[in-house]
Image (tube, rainbow, N blue to C red):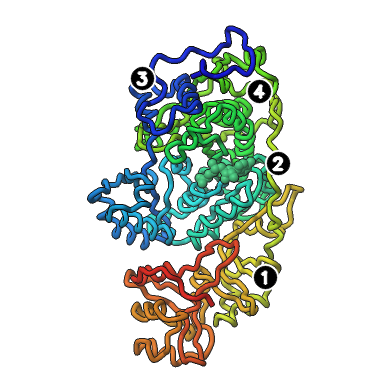
Amino acid sequence: MPQRHRHRHRRPAHLQPAPPLPSPLADPSRPVPNLLAADRFEYFYRRQGLVRSSGEWRHFISTLHQPLPVSFRVSTAPALAHLARQCLDEGAALLRGTGALPAAAELRWCASWLVDVKAAELKAAARPELRAMHEWLTKFGSLGVLTRQAVESMVPVALLRVEPHHAVLDMCASPGSKTTQAIEALFRYGEAGASERGSGFVVANDASPARCQMLLRRCAALGEMCSQVVVTCHPAQRFPRLAAAPHGEAAEGPAASKKRKGREATKQGRKEAGGGALTAHSEGSFDRIICDVPCSGDGTTRKNPSVWHRWTVEYALSMHPLQLQIALRGVALLKVGGLMAFSTCSLNPCENESVVAELLRRTRGAVELVDASAQLPELARAQADGLCHWEVLDDEMCHYESFEAMQASGLPAALKRKFLPSMWPPPAEEAPPLHRCLRLLPHLANMGGFFVALLRKVAPLPGPLPKRTPRGESRTPPPPPPPPPPPRDASCFGEVSAASLGELSAQHALQPAALAAAPLAAELLARGGGGGGVLVRVAPQLRPLCTRAPQPSAAPRLRVIAAGYTVARRSRRGVFQLTHEGAATVAPYARRRRRLEVPVEDGRAFLSAAANTVPLAELSPSLKQAAAALPVGPVLLLFRTPHGSATLPMPGRRLRSSDSLRLLVPFTPGLEFRPKATLHALRFQLGLQDSSHAAEE
Ligand SMILES: C[S@@+](CC[C@H](N)C(=O)[O-])C[C@H]1O[C@@H](n2cnc3c(N)ncnc32)[C@H](O)[C@@H]1O
């Protein structure tokens, strides 16, 4: 332990490393060698007083060395309700447990399940029941109805209680677990069976262009729900204030919003308020913010055992300034009354409580720490209180009482610069209620280590936040700017020209007048100019964020990577090809005589046929008769499924040459939402388990 380290510098006698604790630090049963990094980890956390007894400590450490169990969320979105039911029906026997597969625990607070098997065991699938579980998870995962996500990572969104009218920002969103959870929460009003859309939306942001692509793919699985999603690429600490706030509802909901507006609206605010109009907010624009900041990730040892090999204090220290900057930007972007969940998958107080304490100090009463312990009672078992006191150590496990003591020490100047005054616990007279933070400890409920603080903005921020204050004075140079985002930005989106709408109607046998008059026409945007190569559907409340709407101020423009979902894309021959979602979107406008209901058996024939083309002679008599009466050209195929009365619309074509009907498989390369062809879903719905895709047109 510390004594074994060679000292790189001389220290005053009073700052010599603390003597080792009497109990053995390393769990002898742990599967990693007794590495210095692992020893330091244990020594460091033993000193932080995370747990109450030596017995609990051993339990804590040994749990950190065990692989994570498998956990997954089942979609609560109304659009996927029938698939979710099917998923749970089909998996019922597996969830009850059988053979080597233990019974799954249902976690109702986050609509998810936890199965105490290791992901690697499932993948290896040595036993038939494990293989069956793996196949079930894969199948429903590919249909977007089931999402693998660690339980602890579901907590921030569960605490935020997202409602259909909420404007949600996910500041550091990729790969998108919390984003997709928030999108589904936005649609959860469907519990009562309603299907209309709310006025809310999700802005999912990440600083890394490459990781934005991962985010896109994850969101894509949610199909039409993406009309209320925008993916942006900004360093979160500089995320632009929305000069055009898409709608004016306050965080508490429309009724409370009215009251609050009455009380608090400034002259400016009153002038700007107005149903759905663009409004410039001097305070923030978001009702809910997910602030899941980059962190050292040392709570993830169960998923990522390499942490044991590379753990250092310095890494955590280096995260603190960026985390604080992002959190401060988050509260600036939050509406008064709005909630922000600050979270990390780190156990280090320097990345957690100290960031929260400094944020509370700098916002001077405008932000409060919410006591969320009663909000999810089911979680109580898993949760320990936030720390009100902690120790700041260096990598040689030398403890510093205060920033001043560290400054006075013999640490080299380069190391001293890693420390900030805000890393120490706040003085007793300030004493924010840090115990209200949630520390999710792996041994308490079989999950990974996690930290969440739920913050509510209760008043406008007190003027420009001081950048440099005595406690928060930054001696660390700002992190290097991230690489510039890709060239795609808001200017890529434009209005859809009448000519394009006309082409779309003609090519897919739509009623042009009905389409032009429908609310849908107002929600279509073209990417790549008005005659656009791609038509996307974007909810009206997001339109101002995607187009070059007049900006009331010189606010920086949002760098939009993608918005909404793709309805149609021009092929190389200049023809608009509908996506699966696009077919469902335009189905109500298809000419009656160009719509064909396809019985289940005929549907299976399409999916089994070469090039998805079935000669009319091989169709069932009723479909054959209807198809024979069709003129050559586009047709919308409405596939009946064995379950329920809903149909799945897909684009098709009546071919003259072979006197046949062809199912057109949406061609889906590129960046847009829903990049995968959805034939897999259709196959599955029609009871064909083979997932091989037919040729794309
Ligand atoms: C902990 S991960 C987020 C996980 C995500 N919230 C989820 O639940 O799937 C942190 C993310 O922050 C991104 N990131 C790092 N620095 C950032 C910054 N300055 N601004 C925004 N995002 C940043 C990283 O690219 C990474 O995707």
Mark nearest the camera among 3 and 4 is 4
Tell me: residue 577, above or below residue 406. Answer: below
Q: Residue 123's spot in the image, x, y percent?
A: 37, 52
**Label 3: how many residues lie within 10 Å, few (<14), some (14-19) or many (20+)?**
few
Q: Which one is nearer the viewer's eye here, 551 or 180?
A: 180
Q: Secondary structure at mark 3?
A: loop
Q: Which one is nearer the viewer's eye here, 599 or 260?
A: 599
Residue 481 bears which disc, if any? 2
| Quarter, ligand 1 | top right
What residue would you read off at disc 4?
A: 415
Q: Which one is nearer the viewer's eye here, 64 or 36?
A: 36
CA gap, disc 3 to disc 1? 65 Å
Name the amino acid, label 4. Answer: Leu
What residue would you read off at disc 1?
A: 532
Quick check: 490 left or right of 259?
Answer: right
State which tag comes first along the sequence, 1 or 2: 2
